[in-house]
Image (cartoon, grey):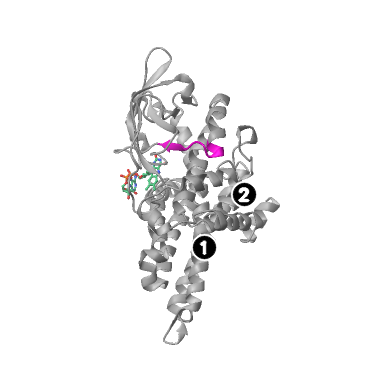
Amino acid sequence: MSDLAIEALLDDKHPLKVETAEWARAELSKGDRVSTDRDSVFAADDWKRCAARGLQGLLVAEEFGGQGRDIISALLILEGLGLGCRDNGLTFAIGSQIVSTQHAIEEFGTAEQKQRWLPGLCDGSLYGSFAITEPDSGSDPFGLSARAERTGDGSYRLSGRKSYITLGSVSDVVVIFASTDPDAGRWGLSAFVVATDTPGVELQPNREKMGLRTTPFGDIVFDGAVVEDAERLGPEGAGAAIFGATLDAERAFVFATHIGAMERQLDETVAYARTRTQSGRPIGGYQAVSHRIAEMQLRHETSRLLLYKAGLLVANGRPSTMAAALVKLAASEAAVASALDATLVHGAKGYVSEFEVERELRDAVGGLVYSGTSDIQRNIIAGLLGLG
Ligand SMILES: Cc1cc2nc3c(=O)[nH]c(=O)nc-3n(C[C@H](O)[C@H](O)[C@H](O)COP(=O)(O)OP(=O)(O)OC[C@H]3O[C@@H](n4cnc5c(N)ncnc54)[C@H](O)[C@@H]3O)c2cc1C
């Protein structure tokens, strides 16, 4: 194990994390967060501030405009971002672009595709999305109906609707999956990296949602959009392998910011339980309250250990599908359970919007759904155990 990985596991106040958290606290999400959440306002200026600090480019090679960081450093920095920035919608959008769109382009793209898209995605001038889900195909991505038909002159005609796409309503570029050979089932799926100003591509308006309301989110419609051979990502028929590998990375790492947010919530809940008194005692002196907070600590710590274990496996080129499913399942369910505990510890203050506790609960629920629901993670884990 590398020294950095040992430090990351043993020192939850690692300087990379703490420095990022201090910067995020000072620079990000300084306006009225209750109204920006209510009105689903995306913090475009904060997005650019993060890019100027190199956050979107953490894992991208320097030749394509990134920082070329190792995975453990990147996780520490993303954890610090989630710890310091109270806008979970912003931090989720950044994490999602890094681990899905950018990861897919860097891992599977040609030199031209990387050069065309990665510098702009890293410097904050472009938004990228990753689109598999359709109105009738979610947990079963092999059931997707988007089609990319050969035109006979070396291009494809792309048709279909992608739904519930993170950054979908503002995307400049989308990695989209469609069938190039419906008779071949999963072996007939292909990936494309497409500019959204291509004629026949239409971004739909932001869809209002329960939580992560400041993340732009929407459908993308493809209506006979002509895309060139050079816009295909990987070979024809490699779509399932590309989204399988990308979803593994997403499941393993997208919770880094949220695990940071869980630590912030834990710190604030401890502070509240120490200072709020009822019947002449701090409420943290009541076992019912202190045990709830002890569970929050346990959930945070286990999620964090699973995150860094997944990071170590990926950094060492080891199989990581089991670890990715475990961290996704554990962290998403922990985030919801701990946000509910924080709400309960805060009493009515936890329930009203102005104290910003209930928002954390709403923000956490989406984690049970994106990157595959909890049921799907359990299916993956059971399948790897030889069951089902
Ligand atoms: C905040 C957020 C961001 C998202 N971002 C993106 C994005 O950027 N790109 C993208 O492509 N998609 C995105 N999605 C969509 C997400 O990936 C899908 O919603 C998810 O895969 C579930 O699909 P579904 O909504 O169609 O539900 P369904 O697949 O219809 O599932 C409904 C219910 O049935 C259960 N179920 C279905 N099949 C099985 C099974 N085989 N075994 C056990 N239970 C099963 C599910 O667990 C769930 O409880 C996002 C969703 C959210 C909420």
Q: Is residue 45 above or below residue 189?
A: below
Residue 217 drawn at (x, y percent): 38, 43
The residue beneath circle 2 is 72
Farthest residue, direction top = 153
Q: Is residue 305 above or below residue 151?
A: below
Q: Give the residue displayed 33% in from the left and 50% down from the top.
A: 209
Is the residue at mark 1 in contact range of ligand 1, meaning its CB lies under 8 Å from it? no
Q: Is residue 169 left or right of residue 99?
A: left
Dividing the picture into quadrants, the one containing residue 343 is: bottom left
- What span is in magenta? 121-131
Q: Is residue 16 left or right of residue 335?
A: right
Residue 84 drawn at (x, y percent): 54, 58
Farthest residue, direction bottom = 280
Farthest residue, direction front = 31
Farthest residue, direction right = 3
Q: Are marks 1 and 2 in contact (CB under 8 Å)?
A: no
SS for callout 1: helix
Q: Dot 1, how many residues are within 10 Å of its Cα: few (below 14), some (14-19), or many (20+)?
A: some
SS for callout 2: helix
Q: Indicate whether residue 123 is drawn in magenta.
A: yes
In space, the residues marked 1 and 2 are separated at their CA atoms by: 20 Å
Q: Give the residue displayed 62% in from the left and 44% down from the top.
A: 315
- Residue type beneath disc 1: Arg
Q: Is residue 95 visible?
A: no
- Residue type beneath disc 2: Ile
The residue beneath circle 1 is 264
Mark 1 / mark 2, whichever is N-terminal = 2
Q: As rendered, which of 19 and 273 lies closer to the eye?
A: 19
Q: Is residue 244 above or below residue 182?
A: below
Residue 218 drawn at (x, y percent): 35, 41
Q: As rendered, which of 44 and 130 lies closer to the eye?
A: 44
Q: Give the residue displayed 53% in from the left and 44% down from the top.
A: 48
